[in-house]
Image (spheres, rainbow, N blue to C red):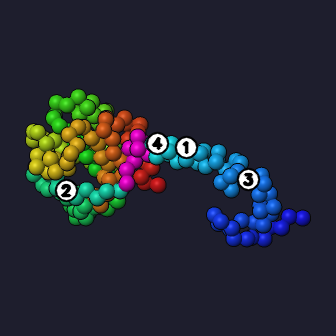
Amino acid sequence: MKDNSLMEVKGGIKPKSCLKNACTRSPTNQAPGDAGVRILLMKKSLLIAIFLLYSGFVNAEVLDFEFMDNSGRTFRSTMLLAQLEQRYNYRYENMSILLIETPSLSDGNYLRQNEILKSLGHGEAEELQLMYVTSCWTEEYLHGYHTSIKTAESLAGTNKGFRLTLIDVNGKSYFRKSSPISLETLRKVLKEKRK
């Protein structure tokens, strides 16, 4: 019968039965398969990290910025829920901002993204509670929701390329991508956010 009581040894606490089999341990006092398991776990962790990096999911960063609509009404990303509730007397808890940062209004990625969003249509965008905000640091965009050039420069920071960020009604970012997003992916991300 095995003695499974625990005993403190160098490297932690082990069952006494392990000590009896010490001669089958490697020089580092590990079971022969421990190194292989550890390598597999490290590979799995690395793959998960790579997936998260390239999938677009980001750590929640609060983006506090002002934007306006085409009539000049201003909104604040961190106060959007309260502003929309006050204006429309409806609580848009699932509203998301799709912040479209672009170096130019003629940028290829920006133009492709606009075509994708046009195919979404106003009705589905409203159903998804999705608001698009264009942020261009080289020229003023005056249609729909947009930031000023100064705000766009501030948001871009050291990033000088096209970038998409999904932001909740409290200003927390939850998805980022440096290329256009397909409708399928956009719907999937918005659906995941609501779970």
Q: Nearer the viewer, residue 165 or 119?
A: 165
Q: Which of labels 2 and 4 is toward the front?
A: 4
Residue 147 visible? The answer is no
* Marking on residue 51: 4
- Upstream in the sequence, badge 4 or badge 3? 3
- Upstream in the sequence, badge 1 or badge 2? 1
Residue 191 magenta-highlighted: no
Q: Is residue 38 left or right of residue 150?
A: right
Q: Which residue of the protein is positioned furthest toward the front in this rendering? A: 27
Image coordinates for residue 23, horizontal then vertical, percent: 78, 54
Q: Which of labels 4 and 3 is toward the front?
A: 3
Image coordinates for residue 152, horizontal then vertical, percent: 16, 47
Highlighted range, magenta: 51-59
How far apart in space, not on screen, are marks 4 and 3 (Cα)?
Answer: 36 Å
Q: Which residue is mark 1?
A: 43
Q: Amino acid at mark 4?
A: Phe
Residue depicted at 35% across the width and 56% down the height: 60
Q: Which residue is mark 3?
A: 25
Residue depicted at 90% across the width and 64% down the height: 1
Image coordinates for residue 108, horizontal then vertical, percent: 23, 28
Residue depicted at 50% across the width and 45% down the height: 46
Q: Amino acid at mark 3?
A: Arg
Q: Secondary structure at mark 1?
A: helix
Q: Residues within 10 Å of mark 4 (few under 14, many from 20)?
A: few
Q: Which of labels 1 and 2 is toward the front?
A: 1
- Upstream in the sequence, badge 2 or badge 4? 4
Q: Amino acid at mark 1?
A: Lys
How far apart in space, not on screen, are marks 2 and 4 (Cα)?
Answer: 29 Å
